[in-house]
Each structure stands twice: as C-alpha cells, then as structure tokens.
Amino acid sequence: MSNRPSAADPAAELLRSALEEFEVPLTRYAVSILGDLERARDAVQDTFIRLHRQDPEAVRAKVKSWLFTVCRNRCLDILKKEKRMIAIDEQQIAALPEERDDPARALRRAEDRARVDARVRDLMQRIEQLPPRQREVMRLKFQGDLSYKEIGEALGITTSNVGFTIHSAMKRLRSMMVPQAESAAAAKI
Amino acid sequence: MIDIENDPRLTAYVLGALCEAERLIFEQDLANAGGAEGAIAAIRDCADGLRAAFAAEPLYGLTGQQRAAVLAEAGVAARPIVLEEAEVVHTEKVLPWVTQPVISEVDKRRIAEALRPAPWRRALPWVASIGTAVAALWLVSAIVMHQPPVDGGLAEGGGAADDELPAVGIGSFLESLGGEDELPVPAELAAATAFRYGEPQEGAEPLVSAAGQLWRNPSFARFRRSALPVLFAGKSYDMLRHLLDAGRLPEIDEVRVAELLNAYEYDYAAPADGETFAVASEVAPCPWDPARQLVKIGLRAAGEEGEAAVAEDVRMAVEFNPAAVAGYRLIGSEVDDGGGASVAAEGPEVPGGHTVTALYEVVPQAAGGEVDRGGDEIATVSVEYKNAVSGASGSVQATVTDAEPSSGGWRGASDDLRFAASVAGYGLLLGAEEGEPLATYDLVRELARDALGDDKSGKRKEFLEWVEKTIEIDRQG
C-alpha cells in the first residue's frame, strides 16, 4: 500500500510541470521586483506551494498568468512587510532594485554583459533605462512569454493598455538604438 | 491616412497578439497605409533582441532544498532539475524524504558574491517565516501542553500538588518571556477589547485539575483568552506520509497535531458578502470522556483559494466564559518558533479562502455530573485584522454556544467534528508530542470511518489507510 500520489495525481502533475517550466522565469521576475535572490526564492517557493493547493482543473488553463500574478503579489507582500513602503506605489516598487543596487550586483551585471555579444549587451542597458512599468511588461512578454491577456491579468491592467505599453516601449528602444547605429555607420565610413 | 507606426496594433501584429478578426482588419489597414515594411522588420528585430537579452540573464532558480520542499508538498519525490550553468550534484540525504540536489560550490560562490546579502534573513527554510509569525500565539498553548504528565492521585488530591505544578510551569514560561508582567496572549490583543464575561477573578488558580489532568482556568486573567495561530506549515502531513511509507512511526517533534489537523479540509461557509472572515463553531460531547466537551472552531477567509495576501496582521483569540467553563485546553502543541519569536510579533497575512481549525477540550462547570447546559454561551471567538488593501482595522466576533445535547452523544456531531477528533486523537496517540494519549486506535478508526463527508481530495480516506498502517507498524513493534 503506497500513499504516494502516482503520476495520475493531477495536482501533483500540474505542480511538477509548472515547476519545470516556470521556476527560472518566475525567479528572474521575482529578482527583478525584489532586488535579491534569497527573498525572490522565498516568494517563488511560496507561489508553487500555493499552486498545489488549487483545484488543478480550475487553474490549468491559466496557470501561467496565475503563477506570475501570485508571484508578483508575494513579492509586493514581502516589500510591504519590510515596511520600506508606506503606500504601494507601483512605480516605486518597480524602481526598488535600482535604488538598492550595490557594487557587487553592479559588478555581476557587468560580468553578465561581458559574456554576451555587444548587441544584446547594448539592449540590456537600454532596457534598464525604460520606465519601471514598461520594463516589467517587457520582461513578462519577452522573458516570461506571456500573452497580452496574461500580462493584463498579472498586472491588473487592460489588454489594450498592455498593447500600448509594449508598443511604446519598443518604439523607445528603437529610438535609442538609431543614433548609435547611425554613429556606428558613420564611424565605418 | 492611418498613422501606422504609432498604432499599437503594429507591434501586436508582429508579435502575433492580434486575434483573427483584428488581424484581418489590421492587414487591410496596412495595405491601405503602405510603407510599413521597414517598421515591421525593425519591430521583429527588436523583439528578437529583447528575447536574447532577457535570456542572457542568470538562470536564477530555487535552492535544491526549496525545490524538494515544493515537491514534497505534492508528495512527489524530488528529482534534480539541471540548470544550464549550474552543475547539479547529489549529496547525502539531508532531509529524510528527499535527495538533495545542490548547486556546485563554484556556482554558489558566484551567485553569493553577485547578490546583495540580506542580513535580516535567517538561514532557515521558508516554513520558519510562517512559523515565526504564529509562534507567539502558540507559546500560549505551549505552557499547558508542556506540563509534565500529572499523576492522577496527586492531582486529584488538590492542595500542595496542585499549587506547585502550575507554579513551575508558569514560572519558567514567564521567565522565557522576560518578566512576570508579560502576558502570554499578545498584549495588543488582550488589551484591545474588554472581557465579555466580566473581569477575571483575583487570586484565581491558573490551572485547575479535573479527571487527573490540568486545565487552563478561564477565571484566571491570563487564561481568560486563548490565542490561536492562523497559519500552519504543512510539513507534518508530508512527514507522516513519508514515515508511514517507510514503515516507521514518528519520533517526538516530527509530527505536530495542530498541523495535521489543519492539513485536512473542513466544510466552512464562506463569509457573507462584504465580510472578511466567517467563524464556525461546534460543541459536542468528547468521544474519549463524556464528562468533557469538544469545541471545534473554524475560521474561513473571504475569497477563493490562491487569491492574493485578503487580510494582514491577523490575530485570533477565544475568550472562554468562566460561568460555563471550568477549564479548557487546546489540543496540539506549539509549532517551531523559528528561533526568534516574541509576543509582540505581528499577526500573519492570510490569503483568500484560507481556513483555520482548532480543537479545544473543555471541562464544563457542572463537571462530574451529566452535561446539561444547553444554550449556554461557552466562549467568544474574536478575529482582528487589517484590510490588506486599505490597511483599515477590522474585527469579527462570534459566540460559541452549547447546543442542546444530542441523544447520540458524540455520534450526533458533524462529520467534520468527528473527523477532526479522530485526527487529534490519532496525533496524540502516535506519541509524537508530549501530551497524554486521549483515544484508542479503535476509537480513532470509529470516529473517522463514518466521517469522510465529500472528501473531494481523497485525503480523509487516505487518513483511514494511515491509521490501519500505523496499527500494523505498531503491532510489529
């Protein structure tokens, strides 16, 4: 007699597949909100444990946006709990990682950049110059691979707002890129 | 003429985010506008670059221990997940039920150096953070349950023995709190509202003895209210499953009765619209001693499970009515205090749909004879909280009333109460905690057998299997 759920246990199966697929993107997302890995991990662990308490049938179809929503809320809870924030100001929260930056992390980011090619490195720097809300939406779209609808659900904004934000952010990134591209072209000549 | 480059649909179109109808309309607009090819190529290029940029971020993930804890929650054996950059190696079994994958030393150092340390965090598993929040409340219950087992003859004799035993327990307990003036119940909670059942009696004994056991006396100021934890770590349930699978019974401290009790679902009505919490209670004759009563208290938060953080700083307490209750005690002992709890700790946050279950044994004032006090108010449950969004304070009060005794004794109680009594009886019977066994295995089985209810998750049925397995292991010695 074994009490261990078999592979047929839908809740356990959902948890396992969600963990394999979303552990890294969720942790990256949590780090981007909280600014450090340890607390990000706590938030992500808590998120997965909460997932297992859901009715698998009810949550399966929207598991991605559910995970990002709950993870985000856990992160905001952690920030609130630390009493670093008196009111929840989205802009401030999204800006926190930068405010709390320190030399070790800046160094790490520089090291990360050194590993990748110049074009990506350049884009990473430009992403960091975006306003916090745009940055968060871009991360959910291009790292988390969430649909417009899923992003809207996670952030509590409308799908058309998501579309507008992504469009504006991409325009902004491209506009930042153009002068550099032109100057590079000029240098070649 | 449509300004196609400033139309958010352009980006949505390139990213495949338009639905079929939107796409057809937009393609028409594109054809009419013309000349958007360059913009489309630029957006596509930018999107590829963004994916590459985000993909180049470090492969952050959970620690092996955290991942194992998540999987243990689902009863799934841990298996290492290999991250591209992090070499995953097996070490010795750190936790009894999982193999622990760890990130290599090089990687650990790399990550540790790169990230800002958070000094306020203790190097404890996540359960400790929940444990810490509720530990203050649990300390209250710790005192009675940590009493050494009382010799029946001595206790019934009254006098010196009765006086001395509580004095030892309370003295050391208060010492641990740092002074005799400290209240075991969180001070804010104790002071927040006046006592419903009159002022406590001066000079009342803290503990009373009945049926060879000690009980908290609600006439005594510090025991008028009993503070309840509102969050539980789920590890006892997982641990017990693991142990039984391995053919073992738990050692002391491996399984907590209160955690086990709260690992099961009970049928509590959701709060009325606009309310944050609903309190449910039930009183029934105690299955293992007809001279006592069992009081089951349930709390359910508004909303559906998994909904965000509904209230925070949640504290729950039960005030017992000394006119009806001679003595009481909470079944189950304290949870891990995480090494640093204080009575002033903030209450925890409670997510949507969260439920809490507590069981008290109560000795009615008319102890010794037939219990016949139908309609009496036994206790009041109060819950205080702050709204998670507005931060406004709120509170809920509900009275616990002794229903007319049903003719069937405990058999007339609800499925939920009988099942909870079975779990509590079983937990104490396991000897996993200090505390006198209350029930026999036969009684535990009888209590649970007809109390499965809906059992959507199948956990109650599984519990019955556990009981059988336990009996088997016990028999083999």
Image (cartoon, coloured by chain):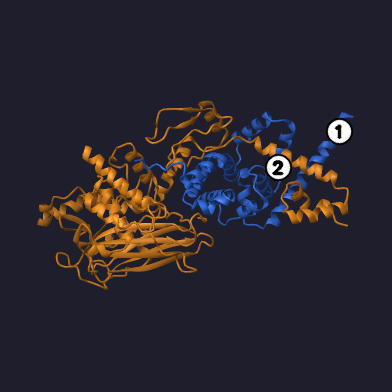
Chain colours: A blue, B orange
Say left or right for B29 vs B104.
Answer: right
Say left or right for B192 vs B18.
Answer: left
Which quadrant would residue B155 be assigned to in this image?
bottom left
Residue at the spot 38% in from the left edge and 68% down from the top edge: B397
Q: Position of residue B414 (x, y in %)?
A: 31, 63
Give the residue number, with chain letter if any, for mark 1.
Answer: A185
What is the secondary structure assignment of the residue under circle 2? helix
- First in residue order: circle 2 vs circle 1: 2
Is any atom of residue B183 visible in this view?
A: no
Which quadrant would residue B325 be assigned to in this image?
bottom left
Q: Is residue B161 above or below residue B125?
A: below
Residue at the spot 85% in from the left edge and 56% down from the top edge: B2
Question: Number of marks in the image?
Answer: 2
Report the front residue among A152 and A83: A152
Q: Is residue B137 above or below residue A41?
A: below
* View extreme (right): residue: A189
Give the residue number, with chain letter if any, for mark 2.
Answer: A127
The subunit letter for the residue under badge 2 reads A
Is any atom of residue A19 visible in this view?
A: yes
Q: Give the residue type at disc 2.
A: Ile
